[in-house]
Amino acid sequence: MTSGREDLKGQVAIITGASSGIGAAVARDLAEAGMRLVVTARREERLKALAEETGAVWLAGDITAPDLPVRLLDTALGRFGRVDAVFNNAGVMDAGPVDAMDVEQIVRMVRVNVEAAFRMAYHALVHFKREDRGTLLNVSSILGTRVRPHVGWYAGTKFAVEGLTESLRMEFAGTNVRITAIQPGSTLTELQDHWPAHARGARNRKAPLLPEDIARVVRFVLEQPPHVRIPKVLVLPAEQGTP
Ligand code: NDP
């Protein structure tokens, strides 16, 4: 048993949803810690810029493509020969009263937040189990732990991520595979940029978290020595008392 922080230098992470917000901040922070990265999202120009800045290998694609998780793992193994962590982060959010929601939009959200996140988790864990080593970080939300009106379609996707994460944590207890749910509160990202201004304005917080705040927490989780587990981390801005 060691008591010090794990040195991340030379370790390899896959980051989904890396083109903006939390994923981009995590990529910058882990690169600064010396990790080698494979990053993905749909916006190629953003990924290229991030790769120039961090030295990451990028693979553009829609995370709902069933073969993308395996291609990400293959890319990391081909380029670096190992995968130490998967930051399972790509996500979308739509919310509103039921008659303002489009059912196709809801189903798209389920595909990204649940189906694609489950596929990424599955393939990461098949690899980690084989190696008896690795960390899976699933990005949930405070809305994966409690709800408020109008957000049920999104919260339901994050409750699914929470249920999966907790069951997997139990399954992998006693192994060297670590599983964590990251539960951010309001964070200033592009997540709600496509919402009508009135909906954004109604919930805008004066002082939300910054993506860098979540990145610091992710690094803290990864730097724990092998005998420590952090099953979940709820991170809130100081002013956020309710979901
Ligand atoms: P952003 O909108 O800034 O980032 C979302 C990322 O997901 C982008 O990189 C986007 O890339 C990617 N993404 C979305 N859809 C797809 C897709 N179909 N295929 C591939 N990539 C996709 O938001 P956040 O950084 O806030 O979101 C990151 C995670 O944090 C999400 O899971 C979100 O639910 C969660 N979260 C966010 C909170 C917040 O307040 N911001 C609070 C709690 C949780 P691209 O568009 O280039 O494909």
Image (cartoon, rainbow, N blue to C red):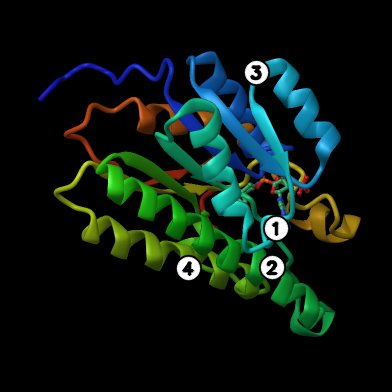
- Amino acid type, callout 2: Met
**Closest to the observer, 79 or 207:** 79
CA separation in Å, label 2 and label 4: 13 Å
What residue is shown at x 80% (from left), y 54% (from top)?
200
CA separation in Å, label 4 and label 3: 34 Å
SS at badge 4:
helix
- State the residue position of label 4: 159
- Amino acid type, callout 4: Phe
- CB under 8 Å between callouts 4 and 1? no
User: From what the image shows, is residue 155 above or below residue 222?
Assistant: below
User: From what the image shows, is residue 98 above or below residue 34?
Assistant: below
Tell which circle, 2 or 3, labels the residue nearer the N-terminal end.
3
- CB under 8 Å between callouts 2 and 3? no
Q: Quadrant of residue 81?
A: top left
SS at badge 2:
helix
**Closest to the observer, 192 or 242:** 192
- Amino acid type, callout 1: Val
CA separation in Å, label 2 and label 3: 31 Å
Front of the two marks 1 and 3? 3
- State the residue position of label 1: 92
- State the residue position of label 3: 55
What residue is shown at x 77% (from left), y 44% (from top)?
190
SS at badge 3:
loop
